[in-house]
Amino acid sequence: MNYFKLSILVSFLFLVGCSDSQEEPEVTTEEEQGPPFSEYMTCTPGSDFDDETARMMVDEWNDLAFDEALFFAAGHAPLETASLGGEGKVYWQLFWDSKEAADAAWASGPSEEFAAWAEKHESVLTCDGENRRGYDAYFPYSDKDNWEPVTEWVTYAHYCKYNDDDGREKLVEVIEAFNAYLDNQADDVAPFRYGVYMHNGDNPEPYASYDFFWMNYYADDEGAKTSYDRFANEGAEVQAMIDASATCEGPNPSNSYQFYPDPDDA
């Protein structure tokens, strides 16, 4: 595990913040309890950040107790210097069973052990937990895709705004068409999964100015390039549907890393 890259993804998890939920369209088949709730935080490396201090911070974070509703965490380091969060920022992503469970965990505040850990490492990394963003995370093809569990991957993000009032309805049609496109791909294509993130809460700008975020996940950049080239050649009809639904920026690539469960135990 490359802790120099991974460490910038660690966050001060228990800054308290509140947001109001909003109804989202049914873009995929989910379990009865609904889609996972995912949160992003923007993080800033500190003056003492280096490979050694980052390794210590990560190892000690994984020794702490986590709320049982938190089942996965990932970090994202953009390949470009600037991103939506600002210059030199990186991102910490949390996956919870539900928004209610996440809100309850944050409201309970940090344990003494967690507070001590955060204070010890605050010169290595700090994250803006108060302005975290909340989303319902849909993975419309996860029951059929060829994604394999990995601890490191690449994420190609698209930030999208609906073109018209019927953008949401058109997005559902896009997802159905894209899934059909994936059905017709050869069995030997590189591992791939995609997610559609819909706002769940009063998210801050500039994120709130976008209606949804489309995330493409690949094992590596080579697989991403092959996939994008194939879609450019074979996915013209689906692309036209996407263009009719929304205007999207990107792709914006990041190196991504599993942070919890502890990748050293994988």
Image (cartoon, rainbow, N blue to C red):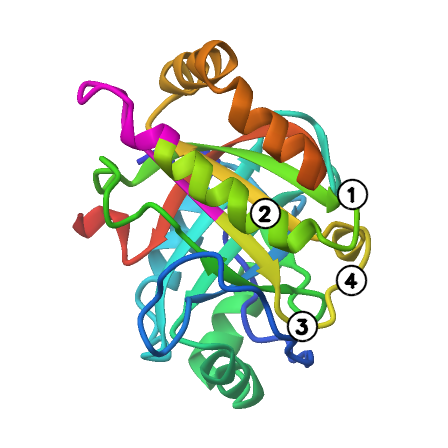
Which dot marks residue 201?
3
Label 3 Cα neighbours within 10 Å, binned few <14 / some 14-19 / many ≥20: some
**Front: mark 3 or 1:** 1
Q: Which residue is mark 1?
A: 163
Which dot marks residue 204?
4
Label 4 Cα neighbours within 10 Å, binned few <14 / some 14-19 / many ≥20: few
142 or 19, which is in the foreground? 142
Q: Amino acid at mark 1?
A: Asn
Q: Is residue 225 above or below residue 142?
A: above
Label 1 vs label 4: CA separation?
A: 21 Å
User: Which residues are drawn in magenta?
Assistant: 181-195
Label 2 Cα neighbours within 10 Å, binned few <14 / some 14-19 / many ≥20: many
Q: Amino acid at mark 4?
A: Pro
Q: Amino acid at mark 2?
A: Leu
Percent x, y of residue 156: 52, 31
- Disc 3 is placed on an element classified as loop
Residue 193 lies within the magenta run: yes
59 or 38, which is in the foreground? 38
From where the camera sits, is residue 53 visible? no
Which dot marks residue 171?
2
- Give the mark nearest the N terminus, 3 or 1: 1
- Give the mark nearest the N terminus, 2 or 1: 1
**Front: mark 1 or 4:** 1
Residue 261 lies left or right of residue 90; in this view the side is left
**Front: mark 3 or 2:** 2
- Give the mark nearest the N terminus, 3 or 2: 2
